[in-house]
Each structure stands twice: as C-alpha cells, then as structure tokens.
Image: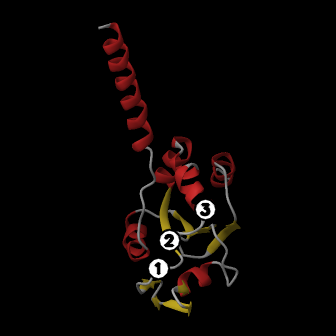
Amino acid sequence: MKILNTIFRFAILGSVLLSGICFSQIKNHQFEELENLQKSELRNVIIFIKTDWCNYCKAMENTTFKNQKVTEPVNQNFYFINFNAEEKRDINFVGKTFHYKPTGINTGVHELAETLTEGKTTYPSLIILNPQNEIIFQYNGYLKSSELLEMINK
C-alpha cells in the first residue's frame, strides 16, 4: 500500500511539472497576419528562420523558446513567427508574393528567407523587424535562453 501511495505522489508531481512546461510556449503567427496585428498594437516582430533537418534549430525550439523566462516577454512584447525556410507555399508579405525556389532534387529555399537574411541564409537565424517591417536586428546561429533574453531586453 505504501508503494502505491509513493507512486501516486510521483505521478501527481510529474503531471504538475509537465503541465508547467507544456503551457510555456510562444504564440506563433503567420506573415499574412502581421498587417492586421500591427493595426491593433504596434510591436516588433521576431522571426525564427529554421529548417526541419537543422539540429540547432530543433534545440532552440525545445529549450530556448520553451523557457518561461523567454516565452512571457516574447508573448507580451513581440509578434513571433516560426518560419521554415523550406516552406513551399507562397507567402504574401509587405505587398509582395514570395515563392519557394527549388535548388535541386527535394531541396530549395524560400525567397522570403533569403530576403530576410539578406542572402546569407544560415540556420537558425533570428531576425527582428520593427513595426514598419524594417530589419533592426539579425543573428545567425544558436542562442541560449539567457542570450535571447539579453538581446530582447535591449
């Protein structure tokens, strides 16, 4: 009976801890939403450019962007876009339509990723736009939670 009681307590503790982790996530938006979002409240935009095969990108998604110390200020003060640079759909942004450009068999890059990284597309990349959609910050590479916090607090 004592063993069942201990297991039950660990199960409850585990579910409480997991629920805290699961609810700590950044609200993701699409490029097409930004114009309307900016009409309601002007904010800078954080764009995380990644690919599905990039291990550093996955690490940032699973650690940096799930850290509650990061999610809260990002959700309160920024619009966030998690953008796959190999996205195949056309994207309308700032009055222009951007397309996927194949570069070989089953490979390619989206024109919008190339435009935002100014032709220096590496993964992961973090771009911050002001409300007028001008690039005010650009970083290529992995960022720890503490580094991202320092950057967004400036």
Q: Position of residue 149 (x, y in %)?
A: 64, 48
Task: Determine whether, in the image, residue 123 is placed left or right of residue 89.
Answer: right
Label 1, secondary structure: give it.
Answer: loop
Is 110 situated above or below 72? Answer: below
Q: CA distance from mark 2 to mark 3?
A: 15 Å
Is 76 situated above or below 13? Answer: below
Color encoding of the figure: secondary structure
Q: CA distance from mark 2 to mark 1?
A: 8 Å
Q: Earlier in the sequence, mark 2 or mark 3?
A: 3
Label 2, secondary structure: give it.
Answer: strand
Q: Position of residue 95 (x, y in %)?
A: 45, 88
Residue sitting farthest toward the left = 1
Q: CA distance from mark 3 to mark 1?
A: 17 Å
Q: Which mark is residue 55?
A: 3
Q: Quadrant of the N terminus?
A: top left
The quadrant holding residue 23 is top left
Instruction: Look at label 1 and name its amino acid.
Output: Glu
Give the residue drawn at x 34%, y 24%. 12
Instruction: Look at label 2 and name its amino acid.
Output: Phe
